[in-house]
Image (cartoon, helix red, strand yellow):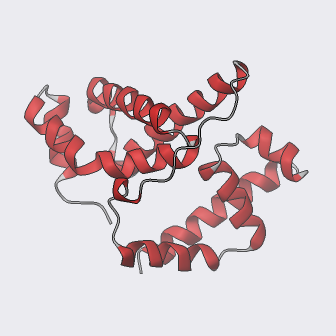
């Protein structure tokens, strides 16, 4: 469930309020950094993505549409797409391993209860849904890459992801 402070902070950010933007950063950066770090497996790259994402959030705060989701989901999508861009960039450059940085548990601003609930909800997914969501959201594979990786038609992959995310949303809001 979304923090009630985020929509007003984003609204003030859209108006150019730097203090509101700083508060928005303070409340969300750890969670967003953890997502990027999980996808990129490299602290320096994740920090760069986070910085780029917050620049985009600052410039595009007025484009947020509450009918399409929560503020945090909008921000997560920005971080996710920036992370995917970084993965593609480094793949094209044929960079060696993206890093051996260890996962920083302090970077995650999620309680143990929330983590446990998420793990339990993920465990309730069908194996195909779980695999598709894991590869798309945690490993950063595009739909096309998923199709090739799990050798399944595109429509099926998209359905697995959509249904799995819907099931996760229902489970997490209970």
In front of the other: 98 or 160: 98
Q: Residue 98, how many percent across, how many down?
A: 62, 35
| Numbered-mark total | 0
**Camera sees residue 23:** yes
Residue 132: percent from left, percent from top: 72, 57
Image-based side of 170 in relation to 18, left or right: right
Task: Work out which residue is located at the far top of the displayed protein and give it.
Answer: 93
Residue 172: x and y in percent read: 45, 74
The quadrant of the rendering that contains the C terminus is: bottom left
Is residue 113 found left or right of 118 in the rendered image? left
Q: Measured from the top left, where is residue 121 in percent x and y?
A: 55, 76
Relative to 59, is 130 above or below?
below
Residue 68, can we see it?
Answer: no
Q: Nearer the viewer, residue 72 or 156?
A: 72
Tell me: 113 left or right of 160: left
Q: Nearer the viewer, residue 38 or 155?
A: 38
Name the residue at 29% across, 23% down: 59
Is 100 rendered above or below residue 118? above
Is 99 rendered above or below residue 60?
A: below
Quadrant showing the N terminus: bottom left
Q: Residue at x 37, y 79 (%)?
A: 113
To which quarter of the image does residue 86 belong?
top right
Snapshot quadrant of residue 115: bottom left
Residue at 70% x, 52% y: name it: 135
| Residue name at image x 17 percent, y 33 percent | 13
């Amino acid at each position: 469930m979304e923090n009630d402070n985020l929509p007003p902070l984003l609204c003030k950010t859209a108006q150019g309020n730097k203090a509101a933007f700083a508060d928005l950063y303070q409340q969300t950066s750890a969670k967003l950094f953890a997502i990027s770090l999980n996808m990129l497996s490299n602290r320096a790259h994740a920090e760069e993505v986070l910085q780029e994402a917050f620049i985009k959030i600052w410039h595009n705060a007025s484009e947020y549409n509450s009918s399409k989701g929560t503020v945090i989901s909008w921000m997560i999508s920005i971080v996710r797409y920036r992370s995917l861009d970084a993965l593609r960039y480094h793949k094209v450059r044929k960079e060696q391993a993206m890093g051996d940085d260890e996962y920083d548990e302090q970077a995650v601003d999620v309680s143990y209860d929330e983590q446990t609930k998420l793990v339990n909800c993920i465990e309730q997914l069908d194996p195909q849904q779980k695999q598709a969501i894991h590869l798309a959201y945690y490993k950063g594979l595009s739909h096309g890459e998923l199709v090739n990786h799990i050798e399944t038609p595109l429509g099926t992959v998209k359905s697995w992801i959509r249904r799995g995310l819907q099931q996760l949303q229902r489970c997490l809001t209970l």
